[in-house]
Image (spheres, rainbow, N blue to C red):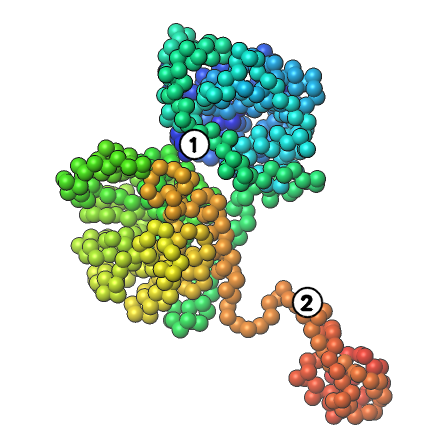
Amino acid sequence: MKIAVLLAVRTVSTRLPHKIMRLVKGRSALEHTVERLRRSKRCNDVIVCTSTSGVDDIVADTAAMHGWTCFRGSDNDVMGRFYEAAKKHGVDLIVRAQGDNMFVCPEHIDSMIDKHLAAAADWAVVDGLPWGMKSETISFPALERAYTHAEDTSMSEYMTWYFDQPQYFKVLHIDADESYRRPQYRATMDTAADLKFVRAVCDEFDKPPAEITTAEIVALLDRRPDLAAINAQTPDRIADKSIRAKVNTRILDTPRTTELRVADSAEIRPSMGASLARMTTFGFDPLPAIELASGRCIGDEFPAFVIAEIGQNHNGSVDIAKQLIDVAAMHQADAVKSCKRDLSCELTEEAWNRPYDGPQSFGRTYGEHRQALELSPEQHAELMAYCRAKGMEYFCSACDAPSVDVMEHIGVNLYKVASRDLTNLPLIEKLARTGKPIILAAGMATEEDVADALIAIRKQHNQVIVLQCTSEYPTPYEDCNLLAMHTIRRKFDVLTGLSDHTIGIMTSSVAVAIGACAVEKHLTLARYMKGTDHACSLEPDGLRRIVRDIRNCERALGNGVLEPAEGVRYAREKLARSVVSSVAITAGTVIAEEMLCMKSPGTGLKWRERDQVVGRRAKRTIPADTLVTRDDVE
């Protein structure tokens, strides 16, 4: 029997990005965790399980450097990744551990394995240990059943919830020894406070972290409540009933198709774009499309240009920005938009020094807060290259003249003018002189404001799109005013779209239905993240659904021609009505209308075509209740 630790390791933590690569006593948390797990006497191997996403290359590189076994799989299906890793490496009993659990207890792992095997359990866990010291064991047949029979595994990060169900699996809960039973302590590394705690604990010992025993850590925390208090207020998300209540852990009696188990982008079917009939139906003549330097086109006859607006939801972190780009690419957005500001052009000295200590603050003053959220030109260039490698455009709202120069040096293919800058004509004129397409947001605009901006741009070129927008966060539906897109199109003869700040996904699809050629929506990894824009942004699954619905909408609009779709041909032949004899008609009889009725199938003459047989003689006897055709008359 092969027993192995499957170690869940990714860099994409929203609470502490790259937490597993954070240094503790000169080495990464991941290195300490693997070294500690390798001290188990019952495990044959430690298999590092990470994703194929580029952000996790550093995990694979670290494993290769140390000669660890590494498996790379799905980046959005944790259970699938574990199943495929166990299957590939022939693991019969899986010890599941997390890469951020530096203090996981190898002695308890060995004891748990023995008790799991003795009880012939499907799943086992040791209860009562400090959070972060425990792991769980799963038999391969149980993992396979969960993988193939779970009704929904979209939250499979928390695999415990799927297995701790006695109605489906043979469950074994093992009580920790009383000397180790300290569930009130938190010894994981999921937040900045946790990292501070882990470093503080390790600093108390003159030996490598992997050699610090569970007994030593528990004893230290018992006599040093100040250390335990460092992260004592950090909530355990796995114990959060509001999160747990959202997770469907039902195990079906029959297998599901694995392609449908996880909510991913497979259901987003490509669209050829809405037919030009969409615009002619509204009385508009088609306008020339805008072609970007990349060859991508935006216009009436092309699929709506879906922009994932990350703004400053990266919180000043390139790693988070790349995770957002990964999400946008996974769910088939066309572009990612950020913003660039030169704060010396943005804030007065008084505004810079104004205290800013609210819950969303990243600095002591407003200026320090804004500076913390800015990315450098080099970072923008890195993100643009990352974005283009995934087939998407990367561009920015350049909020001042120096920022335009930065973006020109980087080489973006288009620009956005934020709603607040629609009346900043010197900035718009500088953007227009670049010769690149410009997207204008009209969130605070009057018709005169839009006219002034278009006049400034059209002195240089006519590659412009105006987005209807409402600068309320979030925007109530009654303030959306989607029909303003038609007013803008009619008055200014310009392509239009929507910058959507509403809650949910409905409004963007409606906008596409009535003529939007571009749609912009804010994107975040999680709405609870620190920062002012996260709460009114789409989370990853919201982006998946909005792109899916936009593409479905484009296909559903059709070409405006009233004719049966090819798909209804069979139903029409089966169910529609045809001219049928209501009585027997002998040969030589002149067919009268009262001899006819309408019945299925629909493969014969329509009632409007009855004149082809009425008033003519039957060439042969026609039995009652029979289709009457042209061949039946002289």
- Tell me the residue at 37%/51% (across/down): 474
The percent coordinates of residue 216 (x first, y second) are 46, 9
- Tell me the residue at 44%/51% (across/down): 504
625 horizontally vs 401: left or right: right
The percent coordinates of residue 308 (x first, y second) are 39, 48
| Furthest-left residue in this view | 349
Name the residue type under label 2: Ala
355 vs 307, nearest the viewer: 355
For the residue carrying disc 2, how many other residues have a C-alpha within 10 Å: few (<14), some (14-19), or many (20+)? few
Above or below 127: residue 581: below
Q: Quadrant of the C terminus?
A: bottom right
Above or below 348: residue 65: above
Which secondary structure, mark 2? helix
What residue did someone put label 2 on? Answer: 571
231 horizontally vs 91: left or right: left
- Tell me the residue at 21%/60% (across/down): 456
- Whichever of labels 1 and 2 marks the residue nearer the N terminus, that label is 1
- Tell me the residue at 38%/56% (across/down): 476
Above or below 127: residue 57: below
Nearer mark to the viewer, of 1 and 2 = 1
386 vs 223, nearest the viewer: 223
245 vs 93, nearest the viewer: 245
285 horizontally vs 573: left or right: left
Which secondary structure, mark 1? loop
Marks 1 and 2 sit apart, C-alpha to C-alpha, by 52 Å
The percent coordinates of residue 579 (x first, y second) are 73, 81
Name the residue type under label 1: Ser
Above or below 308: residue 314: above
What residue did someone put label 1 on? Answer: 13
Q: Quadrant of the N terminus?
A: top right
